Amino acid sequence: MYTQGLDQPAELSTSLDEASLERRFLERVDAEEKIEPKDWMPVRYRNTLIRQISQHAHSEIVGMLPEGNWITRAPTLKRKTILIAKVQDEGGHGAYLYSAAETLGVSREQMIDQLLAGKAKYSSIFNYPTPTWADVGAIGWLVDGAAIMNQLPLCRCSYGPYARAMVRVCREESFHQRQGYDLMLQLARGTPEQKQMAQDALNRWWWPALMMFGPPDADSMHSSDSKRWKIKRLSNDELRQKFVDFTVHQANFLGLTLPDPQLKWNEAQQRHEYGPINWAEFEQVLKGNGPCNAERLAARRKAHADGAWVREAAVAYAAKQSKKRASLAA
Ligand code: BYC
């Protein structure tokens, strides 16, 4: 996708050959030093980061849509306020992440153009519908829960701007997860109809939440490089397993049943075994054929077009201000 890295500092590239630079880079990674935007880095490392961080940013922005759908219909003022704050946080996460990706030499416009053209990936999870209020609870509990599981290790990622952005994102995700769990708890302790609504939402979101962690390790083409470069600290399957082990207890406390008849505790391995994930469905969602892919992209394209006047006004205002400063300085 992006084949060119930024120019490397001239004195370094002339005094050291590529292999020595790469060796030094790997030594710094091994020593747990953070790599910063102006440091030398291999082009593949830069491109891997641009790919992952931009996909992550897109996920936050597209991720505003399934829950945003419920803002006008939240059942109480308190729930509406919480939901508005959560969706707004997600917009903020997208903004930090686009900024982190920009430090690698790609522009926000390029990234957004790729999203709107349908060429960029974003998390599979946001291509599923939210037909009931309980889906808002299930997203907070499971989707934000899975996101924290995946993102906590990213706080220790080797690339400084991404690692630092993740610290704040994780704190906010933790609030998001708790509000979702609290919503599910209220429904689970409510009327039989409310409890059923919570169970149905859990049934809808469980398997897509497990897919969020990405393909099985054996099929994860980027994992070995990402682990070597300490972008990824834990593998897709390791994180998925931690998520299952964690969530089983939370579901028990809610009195809800995870929709997996093969789920069972393995005493010898001290972990839960779970049933097969439908990877064919995951592939279809990634190809753009999930239940809501077309709807999500159409909503983003409309928002982008509707916001054109805001961007034009901001550019005109900035030009006016810089002209004013120039005439004052003259
Ligand atoms: N969906 O080699 P692999 C949120 C792609 S938003 C779509 O394992 P990698 C929230 C992968 O990109 C949180 N595509 O890749 C927001 C690659 O394709 P390309 C979103 C997926 O990068 C609002 C191919 O499959 N979190 O929390 O080593 C409301 C092979 O995979 C998915 C992040 O973005 C997927 N689920 O590992 C509520 C976390 N999985 O690029 C909540 C940051 C895999 O070669 N990202 N693919 O075309 C990561 O940690 C890693 O990128 C992944 C994948 C674990 C997702």
Image (cartoon, rainbow, N blue to C red):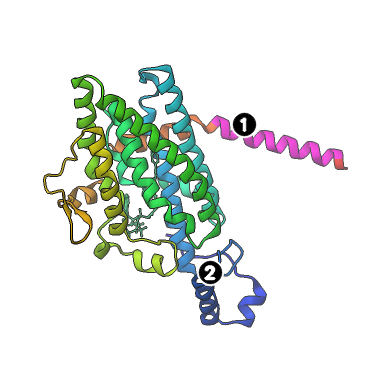
* 249 relative to 20, above or below: above
Q: Is 264 situated left or right of 26 in this image? A: left
Q: Is residue 281 visible?
A: yes
Instruction: State which mark lies toward you, 1 or 2.
Output: 2
Instruction: Residue 42 in the image: state x and y as whole percent.
Output: 50, 70
Tell me which residue sits at (23%, 38%) in the image: 252
Q: Main secondary structure of the magenta part?
A: helix
Tell me which residue sits at (46%, 23%) in the image: 81
Q: Earlier in the sequence, mark 1 or mark 2?
A: 2
Tell me which residue sits at (51%, 39%) in the image: 92
- Which residue is most to the top? 76
Quadrant, the N terminus:
bottom left
Q: In the image, what residue type sits under mark 2? A: Met
- Distance of label 1 from label 2 (alpha carbons): 37 Å
Q: Is residue 120 or residue 63 the one in the foreground?
A: 63
Q: Is residue 188 or residue 200 the one in the foreground?
A: 188
Residue stretch rendered in magenta on the structure:
309-328
* 304 relative to 228, above or below: above
Say which element carries label 2. Answer: loop
- Which residue is most to the front? 267
Give the residue at mark 1. 313
Q: Does the magenta portion include 295? A: no
Instruction: Residue 22 in the image: state x and y as whole percent.
Output: 51, 76
Q: Quadrant of residue 270?
A: bottom left
Instruction: Residue 136 in the image: state x and y as whole percent.
Output: 33, 30
Give the residue at mark 2. 41
Instruction: Residue 158 in the image: state x and y as whole percent.
Output: 50, 63
Tell me which residue sits at (40%, 47%) in the image: 148
